[in-house]
Image (tube, helix red, strand yellow):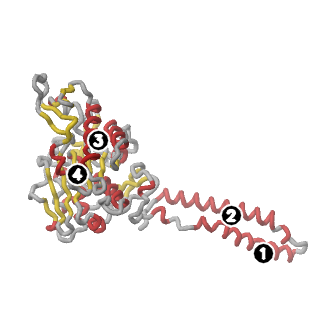
């Protein structure tokens, strides 16, 4: 199926045919004026006959000379079938283009889409924000096929670990996969729980395919700790940077593991709440948050390298997701109708840089889902005031359907490349 590329395609076609015309003209001049002068006879009839034959010969030669240029160019504009094309380029470098075939699902028909993220159901009138597709610069992300992905995941367990942004991606994946399930009742939450941020574990089963898609809430990834003896009064709790969250044992038995962290590593959510860092039994009152985050990631990396069977489990870590708070104190939330034309620095994040650096030095195979740049443009796709609590604007979380669907499209494309979710 071809993508409508509009003006860009027209310009490329014009440039292409100008190039062909120039080569034909040059080639013809070279042949006629240089190599075929003996066809020009003294008499007019001889001259006409020779010129005609010369012209035909030049056209025939030019055809064979230029034939490689006339290979079908439509392949550049096709939605590719799952192959290794995604692995040949940086899928996180690209742009958003409009695509009327989006969104991939209807949140109101998906019982696992949290009401707070269903912006259309919460009163948002415009739907343009649901019609954007991420187009990498040098390749295409395979078009999502729910039935093929369900078969790919048959008998597998997918586990998301992280904060509320991780839960959003978890909800997005379930809604995407459900579009390929005929019996919707065969998909259920294992404990009958309503989807909410208050529950630390949520697990959905696709019983017809024996697929489990689980979410574990662990915003810091490391273990919360008690207040040490003789600690200052401002210390109300601690994070033990050298110990992974206790629930890590529940993550191990997975075929696909997707982690995220970062949004809670701020002064307002740590120090101002009385939470400080601890390592090797010692309180670290003066440790900067980024230094602590790096230490926590090293603890996570060590756990992956020693506890996870990477021959079986595919591991991903998603980078920091861009928010679009504005104003002097970054407390103003203005959702636009179109994606931003400029990133205004939101395509970079110290948290993302730390994640990339730590993963790069690991001995275990971990794929970084570097979503920071693509989200930087999407000032139009946040929840804003279209949540279940409109009095509290939200420029951190995303509407569903929306940007998290793209994270899953990229994730699925990587799973296709592994020729199976398990590495064995």
User: 220 above or below 90?
Assistant: above
Q: Earlier along the polypeptide chain: callout 1 or callout 2?
A: 2
Q: Earlier along the polypeptide chain: callout 3 or callout 1?
A: 1
Q: Residues within 10 Å of mark 3 (few under 14, many from 20)?
A: many
Residue under numbered circle 1? 53
Residue under numbered circle 2? 24
Q: Residues within 10 Å of mark 4 (few under 14, many from 20)?
A: many
* Residue name at image x 17 percent, y 29 percent: 281
Label ID, residue 160 = 4
Q: Earlier along the polypeptide chain: callout 2 or callout 3?
A: 2
Taking the view exactly as shown, the residue that stands out farthest to the front is 306
Q: Earlier along the polypeptide chain: callout 2 or callout 4?
A: 2
User: Residue 422: which quarter of the image?
Assistant: bottom left
User: Residue 264: which quarter of the image?
Assistant: top left
Report, in whole angstroms, how far the alpha carbon at label 4 lies from the one at label 1. Answer: 72 Å
Instruction: List x then y, in percent, for residue 177.
Output: 25, 63
User: 207 above or below 274?
Assistant: below
Q: From the viewer's perspective, is 38 left or right of 271?
A: right
Taking the view exactly as shown, the residue that stands out farthest to the right is 42
* Residue name at image x 45 percent, y 55 percent: 88
Report, in whole angstroms, how far the alpha carbon at label 4 lies from the one at label 3. Answer: 21 Å
Report, in whole angstroms, how far the alpha carbon at label 3 lies from the one at label 1. Answer: 69 Å
Residue under numbered circle 3? 323
Q: Nearer the viewer, residue 54 or 390?
A: 54
**SS for dot 2:** helix
Instruction: List x then y, in percent, for residue 135.
Output: 40, 55
Q: From the viewer's perspective, is 8 left or right of 285?
A: right
* Residue name at image x 37 percent, y 37 percent: 345
Q: Earlier along the polypeptide chain: callout 4 or callout 3?
A: 4
For the N terminus, the image quarter is: bottom left
């Amino acid at each position: 199926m071809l993508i409508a590329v509009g003006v860009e395609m027209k310009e490329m076609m014009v440039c292409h045919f100008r190039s062909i015309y120039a080569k034909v003209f040059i080639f013809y001049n070279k042949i006629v004026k240089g190599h075929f002068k003996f066809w020009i006879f003294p008499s007019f009839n001889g001259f006409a006959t020779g010129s005609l034959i010369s012209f035909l010969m030049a056209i025939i030669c030019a055809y064979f000379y230029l034939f490689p240029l006339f290979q079908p160019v439509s392949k550049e504009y096709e939605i590719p079938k799952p192959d290794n094309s995604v692995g040949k380029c940086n899928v996180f470098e690209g742009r958003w283009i409009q695509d009327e075939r989006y969104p991939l699902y209807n949140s109101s028909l998906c019982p696992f889409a949290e009401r707070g993220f269903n912006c259309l159901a919460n009163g948002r009138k415009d739907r343009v924000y649901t019609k954007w597709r991420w187009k990498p610069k040098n390749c295409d992300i395979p078009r999502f096929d729910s039935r093929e992905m369900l078969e790919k995941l048959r008998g597998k367990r997918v586990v998301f670990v992280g904060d509320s942004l991780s839960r959003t991606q978890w909800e997005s994946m379930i809604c995407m996969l459900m579009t390929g399930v005929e019996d919707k009742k065969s998909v259920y939450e294992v404990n009958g729980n309503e989807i909410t941020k208050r529950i630390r574990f949520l697990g959905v089963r696709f019983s017809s395919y024996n697929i489990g898609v689980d979410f574990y809430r662990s915003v810091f990834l490391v273990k919360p700790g008690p207040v040490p003896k003789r600690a200052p009064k401002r210390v109300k709790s601690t994070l033990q940077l050298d110990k992974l969250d206790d629930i890590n044992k529940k993550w191990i038995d997975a075929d696909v593991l997707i982690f995220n962290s970062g949004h809670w590593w701020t002064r307002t959510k740590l120090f101002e709440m009385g939470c400080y860092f601890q390592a090797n039994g010692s309180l670290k009152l003066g440790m900067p948050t980024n230094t602590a985050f790096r230490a926590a990631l090293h603890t996570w990396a060590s756990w992956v390298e020693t506890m996870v069977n990477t021959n079986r489990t595919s591991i991903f870590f998603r980078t920091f997701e861009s928010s679009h708070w504005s104003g002097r104190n970054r407390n103003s939330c203005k959702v636009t109708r179109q994606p931003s034309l400029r990133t205004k620095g939101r395509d970079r994040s110290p948290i993302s840089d730390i994640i990339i650096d730590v993963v790069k030095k690991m001995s275990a195979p971990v794929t970084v889902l570097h979503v920071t740049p693509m989200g930087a443009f999407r000032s139009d796709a946040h929840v804003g005031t279209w949540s279940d609590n409109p009095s509290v604007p939200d420029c951190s979380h995303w509407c569903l359907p929306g940007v998290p669907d793209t994270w899953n499209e990229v994730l699925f494309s990587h799973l296709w490349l592994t020729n199976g979710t398990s590495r064995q």
